[in-house]
């Protein structure tokens, strides 16, 4: 069947225009300029962790901006090649043009996905936890397979992966595993993977070769930055001084050297009377106050991450994707209907099609709710 090149070009232009309509190019240019200025500061690499994150973010945004700005020219170039090839009846050039169109479609699809990642936490790195469900060795082996799948997916994209925690099962596989994927938009991209994943296969642990269904739960949360210091506004503090007391309320000091500091916004109270002077007690109390506020912040972040992750159970009824290797070969996302007939490729990290379908599905759900 002959390809309607004019229609293909028109479709590319329509999709490109729809992406530009939702992309704030002026804001993106401003962000690139600010990050470039930050990265050029003489002290930029004094904090290597922050510098690496800024560099990765700058690289990602620069790449996106360049693609958005130049894509129209690339469509024009493809159209010109088609016109010249048709005029000269050059079959080889037409074949090249066809390959170019296919490549442009794929790249445009990636751009489209990036415009859909606009959530509050989407830009952040991702922390992925896989937990095995009921099912003995088959379930724990499945949890390990899923963990490997996400590591392979990240490695294929050149992302840095840290293995944070692994609880190994007594037999095969893992009870749970947590990995951190450090890349811009890793959370926004992988967040659609959260849910229960179901595997149907001939059990390698059953000496009778029977079919086994296993479940594992995947949790994806954004990386919340660790803070090793809390800035405290002096206006938020109420400081009281009093005389140190010993057993039975006996005064052990004739001066008001003891200090009680109340952090008014949180209600956290710290008292200190072990040091000899009021200045020393105040300094010690501030150190303890900072520690307590830091711990409070961490607890709030943990509660926030739990809320974002949701309550995911590895069981029947709430699975979001099925992986089947027997009696047929198929991976099917139950939300989007997207299917792949090569489970092994998916296990080896070929997840992009499933993830992109999930992101589009999520956006449709959000639009339906608005």
Image (cartoon, helix red, strand yellow):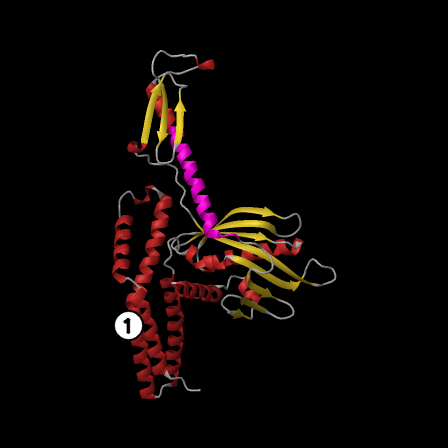
In the image, is residue 260 above or below residue 10? above
Asked whether 305 falls inside the magenta stretch, the response is yes
Q: Is residue 245 visible?
A: yes
Q: Is the magenta stretch mostly helix, strand or loop?
A: helix
Q: Which residue is drawn at 26% across and 58% down?
A: 27
Q: x, y (%) of residue 91?
A: 39, 85
Q: Mark 1 points at which residue?
A: 73
Q: Residue at x 69, y 57 (%)?
A: 205
Q: In this image, 347 relative to 157: left or right?
A: right
The residue nearer to you, when weighing 252 against 46, is 252
Q: x, y (%) of residue 196?
A: 55, 58
Q: x, y (%) of residue 338?
A: 50, 69
Asked whether 54 falls inside the magenta stretch, the response is no
The residue nearer to you, when weighing 98 against 294, is 294
Total marks in image: 1
| Quadrant of image for the N terminus | bottom left
Q: Is residue 127 visible?
A: no
Query: From which residue to which does the magenta span run?
Result: 287-311
Q: Residue at x 42, y 52 (%)?
A: 125
| Quadrant of image for the C terminus | bottom left
User: Quadrant of residue 158 in the image?
Assistant: bottom left
Q: Sort mark 1 into few (<14), some (14-19) or many (20+) by Cα contacts within 10 Å.
A: few
Question: Which element is circle 1 on?
Answer: helix
In the image, is residue 32 above or below residue 75? above
Q: In this image, 98 relative to 150: left or right?
A: left
Q: In this image, 354 relative to 225: left or right?
A: right
């Amino acid at each position: 069947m002959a390809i309607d090149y004019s229609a293909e070009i028109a479709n590319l232009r329509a999709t490109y225009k729809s992406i530009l309509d939702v992309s704030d190019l002026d804001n993106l240019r401003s962000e690139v300029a600010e990050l470039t200025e930050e990265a050029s500061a003489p002290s930029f690499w004094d904090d290597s962790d922050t510098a690496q994150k800024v560099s990765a973010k700058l690289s990602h945004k620069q790449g996106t901006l360049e693609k958005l700005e130049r894509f129209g020219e690339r469509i024009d170039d493809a159209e010109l090649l088609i016109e010249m090839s048709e005029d000269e009846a050059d079959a080889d050039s037409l074949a090249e043009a066809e390959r170019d169109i296919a490549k442009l479609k794929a790249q445009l699809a990636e751009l489209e996905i990036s415009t859909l990642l606009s959530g509050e936490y989407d830009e952040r790195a991702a922390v992925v936890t896989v937990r095995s469900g009921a099912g003995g060795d088959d379930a724990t082996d499945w949890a390990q397979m899923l963990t490997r799948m996400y590591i392979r997916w990240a490695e294929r994209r050149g992302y840095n992966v840290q293995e944070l925690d692994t609880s190994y099962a007594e037999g095969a596989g893992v009870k749970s595993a947590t990995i951190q994927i450090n890349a811009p938009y890793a959370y926004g991209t992988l967040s659609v993977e959260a849910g229960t994943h179901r595997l149907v296969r001939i059990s390698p642990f059953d000496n009778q070769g029977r079919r086994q269904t296993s479940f594992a739960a995947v949790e994806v949360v954004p990386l919340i930055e660790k803070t090793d210091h809390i800035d405290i506004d002096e206006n938020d503090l109420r400081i009281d001084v009093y005389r140190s007391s010993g057993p039975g309320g006996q005064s052990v000091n004739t001066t008001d050297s003891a200090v009680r500091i109340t952090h008014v916004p949180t209600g956290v109270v710290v008292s200190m009377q072990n040091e000899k002077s009021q200045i020393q007690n105040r300094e010690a109390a501030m150190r303890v106050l900072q520690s307590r506020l830091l711990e409070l912040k961490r607890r709030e972040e943990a509660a926030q991450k739990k809320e974002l992750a949701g309550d995911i159970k590895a069981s029947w009824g709430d699975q979001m994707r099925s992986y089947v290797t027997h009696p047929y070969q198929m991976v099917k996302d139950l939300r989007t209907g997207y299917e792949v007939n090569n489970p092994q490729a998916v296990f080896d990290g070929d997840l992009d099609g499933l993830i992109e379908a999930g992101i589009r599905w999520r956006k449709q759900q959000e639009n339906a709710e608005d």
